[in-house]
Image (cartoon, grey):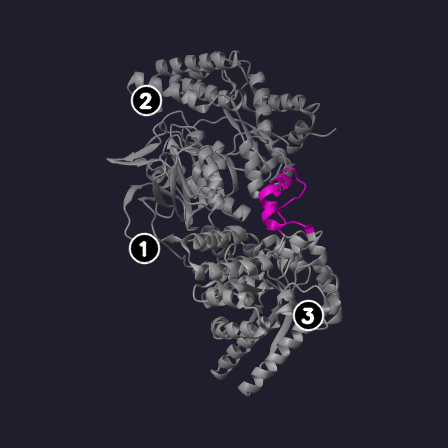
Amino acid sequence: MKRFVFDFEEGSAADRARLGGKGAGLAEMSRIGLPVPPGFTITTEACNAYQQLGRFPDGMMDEVWQHLGRLEEKLGKRLGDAENPLLVSVRSGAPISMPGMMDTVLNLGLNPETAEGLARLTADRRFALDSYRRFIQMFGNVVMHLEHRRFEEILAEVKAEEGVRDDPALSPAALSRVIARYRELVRDATGQPFPDDPRQQLEMAIRAVFDSWNNPRAVVYRRINKIPEDLGTAVNVQSMVFGNMGDDSATGVLFTRNPNTGEPGIYGEYLTNAQGEDVVAGIRTPRSIEEMAREMPATHQRLVEVAAQLERHYRDMQDIEFTVERGKLYLLQTRSGKRTARAAVKIAVDMVDEGIIDRKTALLRQDPEQVARLLYRQVDPAATVEVLAQGLPASPGAASGRVVFDADEAERRGQAGEKVILVRPETTPDDIHGIVVAQGVLTSRGGMTSHAAIVARGMGKPAVTGCESIHIDLDAEQFTVGETVVRRDDVITIDGATGRVMRGEVPTVEPELSAEFERLLSWADEFKRLGVEANADTPEDAARAREFGARGVGLCRTEHMFMAQDRLPVMQEMILAETVEERKRHLDRLLPMQEGDFYGILKAMDGYPVTIRLLDPPLHEFLPDIAETEAALARARAEGDAEAERECQRVLRRARALAEFNPMLGFRGVRLGMVYPEIYEMQARAIFRAQARLLAEGFHPVVEVMIPLVGTEAELERMAELVERTCAEEAEAAGRALPYRLGTMIEIPRAALIADRLARTARFFSFGTNDLTQTTFGFSRDDAEGKFLPAYLAQKVLPENPFIELDREGVGRLIRIAVEDGRRARPDLKVGICGEHGGNPRSIEFCHQAGLDYVSCSPYRVPIARLAAAQAALRAEIGA
């Protein structure tokens, strides 16, 4: 019969899938002899069975009672015993860490009788009553679904009545009043008394933790982080230890290295005379772990030793929850710590230098999407700023936006494209939907291990927490700092690297890459097989891409060059021309402009290939909008401006003639070159003249000419002849050879299916996966993403947005066919990808598997592509 429950001593770190991350960590720490309060774990399999059945699986609760009996025997305490009560915590723990997304209940087993027993046993009535009121509050919120604030309001009322500010200052009599009012609240709100039977409490708490797997915040978190829905959560039932038994007791969270910077040395926070939720929930602002060295030196030294032991054991930076009960240290959890991108890189490189891990492990440990955050902007050091307040630097990066105080409003406005900063006293897991779309988060309470800090770091969003000098009035939708009032919709900037809160929108600057990041990328270059090039349309883009490690331009889109103010009128005149001769006159004006463009990009990428795509979009995109032109025509007629009327009519005739029902599949790409060959001829001439100039100046331009949207062999052959003829003319004029490579974009399924024939002419293929995805699915991207694609993803018709992550089954199959058939016809065929997928790590992995030679992506994605390419090679090496 399948077992659903295991004592901590029965498991190990290898049981993560079954016991969850927290359960496996507790089992492993127990196994290696660290001080872990005993307990047992209910498996993820039980959770999945519960989700399918709508009830606990047969036999599960029988096992729970058996293991509870063993725990009682081990500790000499019994659940519900008024003389020597056993109290337990009930915590979630999924195989993949989801901090704060699911539920926890502490102090379970308390009722009026056991609370009195605990008071007698500890000779500390205040401690016992404080533990009981905490239990009612947490159980009432997590299990009975009452709002947390309703309990906090009662607590605040009693503190006001007593004239005290902090929770520990409440007397036993005051705590008794809090408990009575809490119980009254539960009865009035739910229609039933608070449960006093500890076994009933335990069964209800286990059910609540299983249910929390599908609470809205957990579902959102899994969707954002692409965590499978069927993993389930384990439930850990653990004997309680108490950090709220006086000034020699404490609770805290520490990291074995700084999770913001990666610097060595333990980093964290603690509170004396408190319980764990006080730190994590941000209810009280905690103290730095450094202060513990003075206040509790022996405990601090033991923590340093345990941190080093766990880091060496797991070969990774650890996030450790601990409690000190009357001077004795207990470990409640260890897991690989969440960290910023900067810290992830530094920790990995340092651990290689320290001999803890090797370079391959360091590379495989990086999340390419997280590493992308190293390239985000920072506050300009030269900027003049008005600092409103100083908080804790909880998650680095800078962000500006309009102040909002409500997560729902943040979500609504953020999804509409507005930049907002979510300002809260503290965040809770229920605010995650607002945090996702906000530019950053500011809280007045909570520390650097609070919910807001951890979630923001995981998402790469700036966060400033524990900013106690701001006083937030949620009802008035404003916060004050001294005499300054900041209202809803006012613009502020937060700097998560320094903790500063600034008025208005502050200028930012480009980030600088650390020496550790450069080393990591150099290791990536050693292991990767795929080349990494960049999509760049200007010399500046090309230069920046080269700085980031691009070894070529895989896509230079010439159409963007015609949109400049000094060129667009000439381009429009060329399009409006009614004869070839007139069109050529305007093209002659564009020729030197194009030559300058190509000269700059080839020079910036000197020595590496530059793939220049000839004009691709339909010509009507360069003309004024038809509706706007019709309005201008009406004005001209009304004003009697005959010349303006004639010009509007001329533009309208041409615009209407070029208008299409489906431009994506219309008169664009190679079809323009076939009908108006003089356009492609001008561009080819500009390319070769720029190449000739650079060669004469001693540079080494590597030219690749790409024909877009080819669907037939004849199209490619005609354009190849045109380019070759133009090159020969320019080579003769320059008096030197002008070597180049001609290729095509594979953007429509037919091109992929006749790749062997296209490869007779093309020396390279570049997969334009944006259009190839549209033509394979029959989707118009703008329409799909705006209308039905979200529903397809929600209903799991598609596993991912195919415009973000390459569709391996359909589009990927076409790519494989084209690569195999193309190389059969031309073994040295160069093959790459230049759509947006070229910067997506999962898509890059496919490109490696499919045998492509390179990927091309935006300049800022180049470091990510280098890292992802190395990871793809390493995973292939180990068969992962």
Q: Amino acid at mark 1?
A: Pro
Query: Going by the picture, which residue comes out furthest to the left?
Result: 483
Q: Quadrant of the N terminus?
A: top right
Q: Amino acid at mark 3?
A: Leu
Whether tag 3 and tag 2 are in contact, CB under 8 A, the answer is: no
Left or right of 492 in this view: 865: right
Secondary structure at badge 3 equals: helix
Name the residue carrying label 2.
169
Name the residue carrying label 3.
716
Query: Going by the picture, which residue comes out furthest to the bottom?
Result: 735
Secondary structure at badge 2 equals: helix
Where does the image place residue 517, in percent across and percent down from the top left? 47, 59
The range drawn in magenta is: 777-805
Secondary structure at badge 1 equals: loop
Whether tag 3 and tag 1 are in contact, CB under 8 A, the answer is: no
Q: Amino acid at mark 2?
A: Ala
* 779 magenta-colored: yes
